[in-house]
Every structure is written in C-alpha cells, then in structure tokens.
Amino acid sequence: MDSIISLLGAGLLQSFEPLNLMMIFLGCFAGLFIGAMPGLGSVNGVAILLPVTFLVPPTAAIIFLAALYYGAMYGGAVSSITLGIPGASTAVATVFDGRPMAQSGRADQALMAAAIASFIGGTISVILFTGFAPPLAAFALKFGPQEEFALMLLAFATFIGLGGDDIPKTIFSILVGLVLAAVGFDIISGQPRLIFGGLVEFQRGIPFLVLAIGIYGIGEMIWTLEHTKGKIQMHKVEVGFKKIINNLAQVKKYLPVSTVGSVLGFFVGTLPAAGATPASLMSYGLAKTFSKDGDTFGKGNVAGVAAPEAANNAASTGSMLPMITLGIPGSPTTAILLGGMIIWGLRPGPLLFTESPDFVWGLIGSMYVANFMTVVLNIALIPVFIRVLAMPFSVLAPIIFILCVVGVFATTDRMFDTYLMLGLGIAGYLLRKLNYPVAPAVLAIVLGPLTERSMRQSLISSQGDPMTFLERPISLVCILIAVGLVSYPMISKMIKKRKAEKAA
Amino acid sequence: MTVRTAELIMGVVMLLASFGLMWNVLNDDLTIGWLEGRGPGAGMWPFWLSAGMALTSLWTIARWFRGVTAESRNLDPYIDPETIFMVGITIAAIFFLLVLTNIIGLYFSMMLFLLFYVKGIGRHKWGLTLAVVFGMPVAIYMLFEVALNKYLPRGWPFFEGIFLHIDDFRYAIMS
Amino acid sequence: MKIWKTLTMTAAALAITAPAAMAEWQPRKPVEFIIMAGTGGGADQIARLLQGLIQKKGLSPRPFIPINKPGGSGAEALSYIKGKEGDNHTLLVALNSFYTTPIIQDELEIDVTSFAPIGRMAMDTFLLWVNTDRDDITDLDSYVATVQGSDGTWKVGGTGSGQEDSILTAMMEKELGYNVTYIPFPGGGTVAKNLVGNQIDSTVNNPSEQMEFWRAGNSKPLVQFNGERTAPFEDVPTAKELGVDIEYYMQRSISGPAGMDPEAVAWYQNLFEELFNSQEWQDYCESDGLTCSEWISGDELAEFHNAQLQRHVELIETVGADAITSK
C-alpha cells in the first residue's frame, strides 16, 4: 500500500508539470466541445487528434488524449440535455430524463447534476483503479463469450421497465432494434445479411449513431416543430450565482444512485468488449427499478440524469484498465488510444506497470486532475450551454439539422448514411405519434451485435450445448441476477397487493 | 386520415416490412435453424426476430380491432393540415440539402437551407439571417476541417475548386 | 460576398505561385487513407503511424486522413476504391483480405490488379500460439496429437470467417489431418486475450497481437509460418522445417485507385519509400515482428499482387470456400 501511495504521489506530481497541466486543460476543453457536438464523441475526438500528439512526449500525449476522453464524456451529456440528441451511445440514457428536464426549464439543474455525477463517477473509479488494477485485470480475463452474453442479458433485464405502457409496441421496438443491428457482414459465418439485394452500403451495418441521430435529432426536432408550430422559443433559463448554489445542494438527491452507478460502471467498464454504453444503461435501469418514485423516471427525475452519467464516466476509466494491463481495448475509444501508445513506443500489456511506471502513474495521476478540471470547466460553461436554448426555434432548428447531417457524415464518411438518418428519423417520428416507444430500439441496436455474437461464440465453443451458460459460475450468477431483476417488479407488486389485502 | 386509420395502416405496413425482412434472409440462403454442434445459423437471429416483429404487429392489429389501444379509438386527424405543411416542408428542405450537397457541396447547400429556413419560414430580420447563413458554414469549416481535419463533401469539381483555393490560403498561412 | 472575393483572390495568387516553385505533382487536398479494417487493429495502427510520421516529418503539403471502412471483410473499402477510379487523393491500406474478399465475394466484381500499386510496407507473419498453462503441449507433434485426440472440440480463435487466419486454420486442418472448432472474435487483440484467459485453446495470431503476453510468459508460440525464422522468434521452428508444407504471410501494402495519374503514383511511391526507410518505421517493424527488409513498389509490387492473388485462388480452392465460411 505504501508503494502505491508513493507511486501515486509521484504520478500526481508529474501531472502538475506545466506541460502536462496544459495538456490536461486543452484535452478537457477540446473534449467538452467535441462531445457536445451531436455525432462527435470521444472516439472521433481521440482518433482525429491522435496525430497532434506526436509533437509532445508520450506521457503528455496520453494525458492529453485521456483528458479529451474524459471531457467528451462530460460533453456528451450537454447535447443530450440541451438538444435532446445523444452525442454518443454512452449518453443515450442521459436523454431519457435530461431532455424532459430541459423542456420544463430545468436544463441548468440537469447539466449540474450531470457534471457532479460525472465527477463522482470519475473519482470513485480512479480510486478503484489505483487500488485494484492487477486483480481486476485477472478477473477480466475470466470473462469469455458466455459471461459476455450473461452480462448482456443482465443489461436487457435492467431496462425492462423502460418501455412504454403498450406491451406489443414495446416488444416490437426492441425487435426492430435487434434486427437493424443484424444488418451487415456477419463475422461468425462470413456472410452478408439483410443487405437488400447486395447493397454494399449495408455491408457495414447500420451504425448506432445513424439511428440515434435520426430518431433523436431529426425525429425529435420534427416532433417539437409539430407541437410548437415553430413559433415559440424553447425555454428560457436564468442562471445566477444563487441558483448554482441551489443546484449544488441537490446533490443529496442523487448521491446514492451516483455512487452505485460509479461502482457498477467501473466494473462493467473493465470488462473488455462491454464498455460504457451498457454500463450507463444498467445504471439507469437499476436507479429506476429501485427508486421509491420510479414512475417519475423518464419525466425529468434528476437521479435519471445522474445515474447514467456517473456510470459512463466511471466506465471510461474502467475501460482503460484492460487497455493498460492487457493491451485489450475495453471500448472503441481505448482501441485508438492503444494504437497511439504503440506508436509512441510503449507496449501496453501485463508488463507495462513494471516497465514504464512513470507513464502508468503519470496517467493515473492525471486522471485525478483531469476529473477535477472538467467538473470546474463544465460548471463554469453551463451558462454558455444554456444560451443555446434561448435561441428562437426557427433559428435553432435548422442549425441542429445541419449539425445532424455533418455529425453523421463526419463519423461514417458516407453520404448514404445521411439519407438513412433522414429516413429513420421520419419513420421514428411516425411511429412515435402512434405511441410506439423509440428508446428501446435505440438501446437494442447498441447491445444487439454483442449479444448475438457472444451467444453464438459460446454455443460454437460448447458444440451447440446451451447448458454452457449455466455451467460457468460468473455467467450463472449474472443470469440469476437478471432473472431476479425481471421478476422484482412483479414480486414487489405482489407483496404490495398482499399488504394491501391484509390491511383491508 | 384519423389516428385510428393510421394505427391500422402502420400495423399492416410493419407486418409487411417484417415479412420482407424474413424473405430477405431466406433469399440470401442463410440457415435459419440450429446447426448441429455449432448453435444458431447465420440467419436464425434476423429471421426469428423479424418473425417476432410480425407477431407483435399482428398483436397490435388484433388489439386495434378490439379497440384496446387508445389510438384505435382516437378519431382526431393523425397529422393536422398545418403540421403536414410544416413538417413536410422541413423534411423536403433537409432532403434537398442532402441532394444539393452532392452537387454544389455541403457549404453552399447549407447556406441555401439556412436562408430558406431562417428567412423563409422563421421570417427573421435580414441581419440575423445573414449572420446565420454566413456564420454557420464558417463555424463548421473551422471546427470540422481546420480543427478536426475532416474533409466534408464539396460537390462537383467546379465547386470543389472554389474550396481548394480557400484551403490553399489556409495552408499557406498555417505553414 | 466581399470577404469571399478577397479570400479567393489571395488564395488564387498563392496557388499560382506555389505550383510554379515546385513543378512536380503534389496533393492539393487532404488524402483519404482508406483502411480496410476496423479501428484498433494492425492495419489501423499502421495507417495511423504512417499518418503521424508524414505529419511529423512534413512530407506532404496536405494531411493524410485515415478513414476506416471495415464492412464485409474489406468489401466496403474495396468497392469504395473501385468507385474512385482516376482519383489522385485516395489511398488504400491493404492486408490479405485485399486478395481473399474479391475471391470469396466475386459478385462485387473487384479487380485488385487494376489498382495502382504504391508500395509494400511490410510482411507480417503468423505463429501458432497456445497458453503457457498447457504443459502437455511443447511442440507441434504434441499439439497435433492433442488436437486429434480432442475429436473436433479443440477451440481455435480467429478474427472471422473468410479472414486470413481462418484460411490458415483450414490449411492446417487439411495438412495436419485434424478438425477443430473455429470461433470468430472481432479483432486479433480480443483473440489473444481469450487465449490467455483460457476461453480458447489455440490461435494463429500475428506477433504484434501476442507479443506482450508472450513477453509476460502467458502464451507460447509452437510454430511459425514464415519461410525462415524471424526475430525475435529465433527459437521457434518454421512449419517447413517440421515437414509441414505451409508458408503464409500477411502483406501490408498501399494501393491507389485504378487510373491514378502516373505523376501522382510516382509522388506517393517516393513518399512511402522515404517512410519505409525511416528509422521510426524500421524500429516499429522490429518491435512488432514485421519483416521490412525489402522495399517493393510499381511493377514489382503489381507482380507480387498477381502472384499472391493466384495463390489465394488456389488456397481457397483446395480448402474449399465452405471450410472458411458457413451459411
């Protein structure tokens, strides 16, 4: 323990060197804005700015990119809340309550909650990272396809309650998302699927962002257009010093969910292949299931913003763990960070901790500092972000449409996807008007590919025997928890009924 | 069209779409069943999930006939005329934005789109309109091309040429 | 509009003077660097390293922009390059799916020999790996015996049906007379991790993917599929030495679309030759177990591609397309 503290101290000291401190600041700042752009998330930010880092020493470079990753995670919440468009898959769950809060004029509260929860998530996860990196890495290795599949079941189980009140339409929405996720080239069989008569454009599959921006960007804007008739301004929010203090005092409302979300997010994040998206969804689902006022979730409950935000920031720290200790990226973003480290001549893997301690502890130290810096920056910028909402709708709407188009194009580099986005957006709008919930489809398209792949990998390796999921201890535990979560709402209803009967 | 009719039509359309997807899987000759010793075939997941879509659509249609859903009893218009105009014109404008992007490039089509929307629909003052029309492309160019090193579509060579001069200028002052 | 005019005029003035100073062809817009694989893999790493080196050394007046088009084992990237005929600002970072994808998906009608050959940056190799925990497996013979004894339940991890390692696995099944269960994972890194975590029994990984686990003593190579032993695996026998007729490489090369201007081709060839000979590139090759001793470009590279394409046609014929993909 002593050695960890002294190493950490050295790392912290390192991150206070002027160059590194400047890198943290620049990274956080750039990340915040990149994350806030609909479509652009940490993946793009890190990929695009990677070459810039060849100009500075490796430690400063990774610190810059890690700070950018952090900043983008915070920034994703900004577009989810103010515009209602998730900037990245990790911020989808933030839309559920962030958007209604902004619509009822509480955007500043939501942004503050997102910032504070992210800070909590970041801090808890960095502490866990500092203390338990090697044993967790060993645990992550135990995760095979069976465990991944069980984890996905767990993720689906946690958001069982997210659907609408119309059961067939909710199931339909989940299925549409899963089917859309199957479009494209199947790596297990080496065959293209559902490419509609050999359209090469579909071979790549339908990227999550195309659907999310279509539905939340185009669809949501058309929806708003219909309801406001393009006349009114969106929502004016006044920000004053007093209000900030007031908002800060709300912390106690979401401190528990943020803490749980952070721990959960960190663990899910450390598992290669899982990453921050399932983490944030699970955190949201749990917060809703176990909340006393679960019904207010989705209608602007501040805990519904805090839970996923704490989890996705914690998961982003978590996903650095397999990258550093195993050389395996836990998320697309860390995949690119990993490429960067190799280019700088560092070899991420089991030996990195002992061979390049300066680098590893410099990075860990910088995570503490980056976390602190982003929360300060973010709170300071809330008034700026809020101003967006004060724009007249007939100016804001076209700007958002253009950002959607550019955001999709910049992510996938294909005009085809912009048409697809428009089409899916219109379809989503028409379905939503008939009370089809759209959120389940968006969630399903994120989790679908991993669920199918891990299921088929497991079955291939067990020679087609489905018992394989129950024979492995970690997988069995996850499945049992999933079953418990699905039945929990029913059981608690039954218990309530019994109690009511007894009382009567 | 009333909400009631719309729900039925949507149910039927989605049913047909599900069949289309199922047919697509079969047409690609993918295995929709269980492969002995290997688990699900390549077509199993998409085929049976599409079958599930078809079933839930049927379920919705059945509920419509029994009048269970709120929508099936709702005789309000699905989309009122004012909304059709508003939404239709917006969708058409975005579509033209995309089509024109292939021809005159994203920047010019963006300016036309903004001009149309801010002046034509929003009826804002010329000052604000022009600020948005010229400010937005500049902001996009600075953020995506200068800071993030992206290359956004610029249309046919003639229009691309115009931007190459701007690029030349930018690289000349930056180097 | 006034700003526009001034801008374009200044730019035009600059544009006239700039090319006059340098008569040879130069890129005038950013060069799209198309990667036929996803982010984080070997091809992606190479593309991003090259991009960084170009920027650091100031070798190009316009930046190179890596773009991943991983769809359909590279089919998306190849179709894209096919559609860019005559374009001087698009390059492809190729690996072996450059040959296999057009053969397996012949409906795409892609002729890679029509592409402009720029240069071969490296030859990568494959090794057969098992977890160090397997004390019973010490060499190829004990490996083959164990696999044959497993009656088809031996689990080999790879990067996807129809990919290079699935072909190599099929070749081994044929040559060594056994059957295995091939499990696809997304990317070589995930494959390596699953080997170390004992989720699968063996892999054919590139050296770069297993290097760190090997150094940490988690995995061990049994055979290499090179023609001769390469550093740092001097102790690992080649398949040929053991009397198994398998020799297989992964090429890492750069191509342009068909019909690229000869001046542009020449310019890119020079650029990549300079990169190839740079200290940074050679260092990277050494540390990642790549062979980068010989620079091949132009007609020589075209011949190389032709020969490789032929070889892959034969390989896929002998193992049968069904052995590597399933419906």
Image (cartoon, coloured by chain):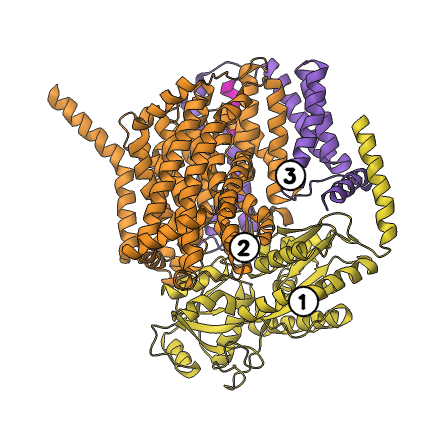
Q: Which mark is residue B144?
A: 3
| Residue at 33% across, 35% down | A258
Q: Which amino acid is tagged 3?
A: Phe
Mark 2 or mark 1, whichever is nearer to me = 2
Residue C119 part of the magenta segment: no
* Crowd class of label 1 (few under 14; some 14 to 19; many from 20; radius 10 Å): many
Colour displayed for chain C in the image of the structure: yellow
Q: Which mark is residue C66?
A: none
Question: What is the spatial separation of the Cα atoms under label 2 and label 1, in whole angstroms?
Answer: 23 Å
Q: Which mark is residue A57?
A: 2
Q: Chain of mark 3?
A: B
The x, y position of residue C221, in whole percent, is: 45, 75
Q: Which amino acid is tagged 2?
A: Pro
Q: Nearer the viewer, residue A174 or C79?
A: C79
List the residue tagged with mark 1: C276
Q: Which residues are magenta?
A: B1-10
Mark 3 or mark 2, whichever is nearer to me = 2
User: Does C174 sit above or below residue A277?
Assistant: below
Let me know if residue A178 appears in the view: no
User: Does A90 sit above or below residue C58?
Assistant: above
Let me know if residue A498 appears in the view: yes
Q: Chain of mark 2?
A: A
